[in-house]
């Protein structure tokens, strides 16, 4: 059940993203990033594999908030695993993808802010890394 939806046009043209804060019946929250990645492009997962030079997708909460990160960033869509010559085995998402960050806000938390970071690549090149700021209101 989404509480707030925020739309952000990413700097990298091949990717569009929306953010949601969802609350499950057990009271846990997740920050969800839903991505629409143009055909031919992909984003590496938080564990990209490869030769150590790939930039992982990440979500970081701004410091000083009364919010605890419950787990690492989760991939909630199909992960493609591919062995690329001279790079090694890599993990990425393409098409419609979703990432989620479980959080535990304190009772006084009214919003959550942070940065969603990724690098978009195709079979020939990678675009510069992109940081997208998000702000989501926490409603009971």
Image (cartoon, rainbow, N blue to C red):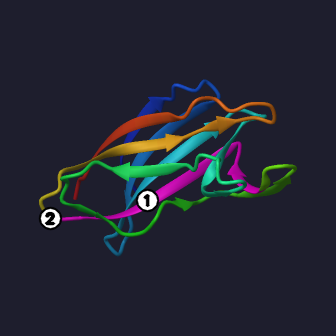
Q: Which residue is pictured at 39% across the width and 43% down the height?
A: 115
| Outermost residue toward the bottom in this view | 26
Please tell me in which quadrant of the rendered image residue 35 appears: top right
**Residue 132 belongs to magenta span:** no
| Residue found at the very far left of the displayed protein | 108
Q: In this view, does 23 lie above or below 139?
A: below
Tell me the quarter of the image containing the N terminus: bottom left
* Residue identifier under label 2: 107
Q: Give the range drawn in magenta.
A: 89-106
Q: Which of marks 1 and 2 is in front?
A: 1
Which residue is most to the right?
A: 85
Q: Where is residue 36 in the image (x, y as percent from the top left)?
A: 62, 38
Distance from the alpha carbon under mark 1 to that under mark 2: 19 Å
Element under label 2? loop
Residue at left 62%, top 54%?
45
- Tell me the element at label 1: strand
Q: Is residue 110 left or right of residue 27?
A: left
Dot 1: within a 10 Å radius of its alpha carbon, few (fewer than 14), some, or many (20 or more) residues? Answer: many
Image quadrant in which you'd find residue 88:
bottom right
Q: Where does label 1 land, which residue?
A: 101
Dominant SS of magenta comes to strand
Left or right relative to 49: residue 40: right
Q: Position of residue 84 (x, y in %)?
A: 84, 50
Q: Residue at x 81, y 36 (%)?
A: 123
Q: Earlier in the sequence, mark 1 or mark 2?
A: 1
Please, is residue 15 above or below residue 107 in the view? above
Please say whether residue 104 is one of the residues in the magenta stretch. Answer: yes
């Amino acid at each position: 059940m989404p509480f707030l939806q925020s739309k952000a046009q990413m700097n990298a043209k091949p990717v569009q993203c929306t953010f949601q804060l969802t609350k499950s019946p057990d009271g846990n929250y997740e920050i969800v990033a839903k991505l629409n990645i143009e055909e031919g492009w992909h984003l590496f997962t938080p564990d990209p594999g490869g030769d150590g030079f790939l930039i992982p997708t990440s979500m970081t909460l701004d410091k000083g908030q009364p919010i605890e990160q419950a787990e690492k960033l989760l991939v909630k869509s199909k992960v493609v695993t591919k062995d690329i010559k001279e790079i090694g085995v890599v993990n990425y998402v393409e098409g419609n993808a979703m990432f989620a960050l479980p959080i535990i806000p304190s009772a006084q938390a009214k919003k959550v802010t942070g940065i969603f970071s990724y690098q978009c690549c195709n079979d020939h090149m990678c675009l510069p890394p992109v940081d997208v700021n998000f702000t989501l209101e926490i409603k009971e």
